[in-house]
């Protein structure tokens, strides 16, 4: 970036950047069909809570409005999951008013990203991705999108923070660039570009108390977007993240002193699964992960982000701190192993919990169902229609039925057949042992 050399250049402001970037930012109109329960008491403050969950179920069309960014001439577009996820109809409108139907190739709710393909598109304007690790606080940026549905709008600001996690209304799972460029509803999925017109992030959320922009907006870094595009082109429909097989927490100031650190840094590992690639590389509980591929990590979210950017099939260079010594080890980035076989089984009509589906717990099941890392045994993967009436939930781990241990899926069918029409089911839920009595 060069300093303007004349009054003419100063008066142009960001015009050249906008002319280059704005044609690649699109408006998105999405429709989805949602089911809702209708009850005459639904708006009553007293009876509404009593009759919650009762009433007729009807379908209605829900519309959403957002933005997107064209990333290739053949019509690959990135947007947010909350804009187009589960959409039944998507219409994309370019700045020059051309319109295209679109279909979602890959979507991921956790990352709030979706990759789409425009039907019949060719030779479209598009943005190049910039390495978001090169972005620095203080850089000038432009946010381009369709706030409040008023039409394409450009706002300017700076990058005001890097490596933000635990913010943005996603439950603390994300990793963002922070900007003070005004971002409002409708900007979601739009572009955050640098002064050279390269995409550094996809605008996703704001931190606000009033509902409007307060100068704190968040964008998903371009390096993660690049991995999404690669997997979409490979034919994936859901984003495949490398599996760490570890649990850990950020090292805070109080912990740093006890660990002999002069300043807090890194993520201390509290447990490691036997199948974890970190275990295979030589990591142990108590080690502190301070960097992945030479990029510092200070929260679990940063660690997950860095592994996702590295990608499955690659080896990440992970720096650990143990007994005051730093060492960098190569860790293979793998998908969660689907072994032992999950042997997913749906219970037959001959038992009281007919229709409930159970499976062996393995690393893949742990990752898919967000189970504790040390989970084992047999888990309910789909409670069906009857089990919830007894209090059972998807994600419960079956411990026993009428005193019979449940070690594999077929044991559940056998024990329920022996139990007949009454008995006690013991489960483990969120670390708590619970028992449910049934009689039919």
Image (spheres, helix red, strand yellow):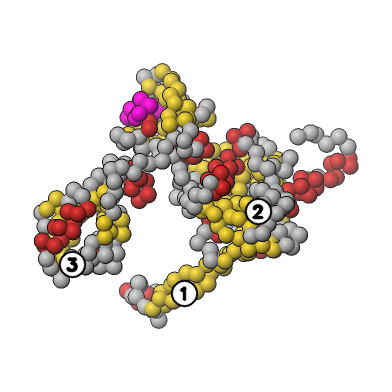
Label 3: element kind = loop
Q: In the rendering, at what x and y percent does residue 170 appear?
A: 48, 51
- Image quadrant of residue 132? top right
Q: Which residues are magenta?
A: 279-289
CB contact under 8 Å: marks 3 and 1: no
Q: Residues within 10 Å of mark 2 (few under 14, many from 20)?
A: many
- Between 433 and 366, the residue placed more toward the observer is 366
N-terminal label among 3 and 2: 2
Residue 215 appears left or right of 402:
right
Q: Nearer the viewer, mark 1 or mark 2?
A: 2
- Between 139 and 188, the residue placed more toward the observer is 188
Q: In the rendering, at what x and y percent does residue 146 appear?
A: 67, 58
Q: In the rendering, at what x and y percent does residue 253 appear?
A: 42, 30
- Residue at label 3? 350
- Residue at label 2? 75
- Image quadrant of residue 438? bottom left
N-terminal label among 1 and 2: 1
CB contact under 8 Å: marks 1 and 2: no
Residue 159 seen from this side: yes
- Residue at label 1? 59
Label 2: element kind = loop
Residue shown at the point (89%, 42%) measured from the top left: 8
Residue shown at the point (48%, 33%) measured from the top left: 314
């Amino acid at each position: 970036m060069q300093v303007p050399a004349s009054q003419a250049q100063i008066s142009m402001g960001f015009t050249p950047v906008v002319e280059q970037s704005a044609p690649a930012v699109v408006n998105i109109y999405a429709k989805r069909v949602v089911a809702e329960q209708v009850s005459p008491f639904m708006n009553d403050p007293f009876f509404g809570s009593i009759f919650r969950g009762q009433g007729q179920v009807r379908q209605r069309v829900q519309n959403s409005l957002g933005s997107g960014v064209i990333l290739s001439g053949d019509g690959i577009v990135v947007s947010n999951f909350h804009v187009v996820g589960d959409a039944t109809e998507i219409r994309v409108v370019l700045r020059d008013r051309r319109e295209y139907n679109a279909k979602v190739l890959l979507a991921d709710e956790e990352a709030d990203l979706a990759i789409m393909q425009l039907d019949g598109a060719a030779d479209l304007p598009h943005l190049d991705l910039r390495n978001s690790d090169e972005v620095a606080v203080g850089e000038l940026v432009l946010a381009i999108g369709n706030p409040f549905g008023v039409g394409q709008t450009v706002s300017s600001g700076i990058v005001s923070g890097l490596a933000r996690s635990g913010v943005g209304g996603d439950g603390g799972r994300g990793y963002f660039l922070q900007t003070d460029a005004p971002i409002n509803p409708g900007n979601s999925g739009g572009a955050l570009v640098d002064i050279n017109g390269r995409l550094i992030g996809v605008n996703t959320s704001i931190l606000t108390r009033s509902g409007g922009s307060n100068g704190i907006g968040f964008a998903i870094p371009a390096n993660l977007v690049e991995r999404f595009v690669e997997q979409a082109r490979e034919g994936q429909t859901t984003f495949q993240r490398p599996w760490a097989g570890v649990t850990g927490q950020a090292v805070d100031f109080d912990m740093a002193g006890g660990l002999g650190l002069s300043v807090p840094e890194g993520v201390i590992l509290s447990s490691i699964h036997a199948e974890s690639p970190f275990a295979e590389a030589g990591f142990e509980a108590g080690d502190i992960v301070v960097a992945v591929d030479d990029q510092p990590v200070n929260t679990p979210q940063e660690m997950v982000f860095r592994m996702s950017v590295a990608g499955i099939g690659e080896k990440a260079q992970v720096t650990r701190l143990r007994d005051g010594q730093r060492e960098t080890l190569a860790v293979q980035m793998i998908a969660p192993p689907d072994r032992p076989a999950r042997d997913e089984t749906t219970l037959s009509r001959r038992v009281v919990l007919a229709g409930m589906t159970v499976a062996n717990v393995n690393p893949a099941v742990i990752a898919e169902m967000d189970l504790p890392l040390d989970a084992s045994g047999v888990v309910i993967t789909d409670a069906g229609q009857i089990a919830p009436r007894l209090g059972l939930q998807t994600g419960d781990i079956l411990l026993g039925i009428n005193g019979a241990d449940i070690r594999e899926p077929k044991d559940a069918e056998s024990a329920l057949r022996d139990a007949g029409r009454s008995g006690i089911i013991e489960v483990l839920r969120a670390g708590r042992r619970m028992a449910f009595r049934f009689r039919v």
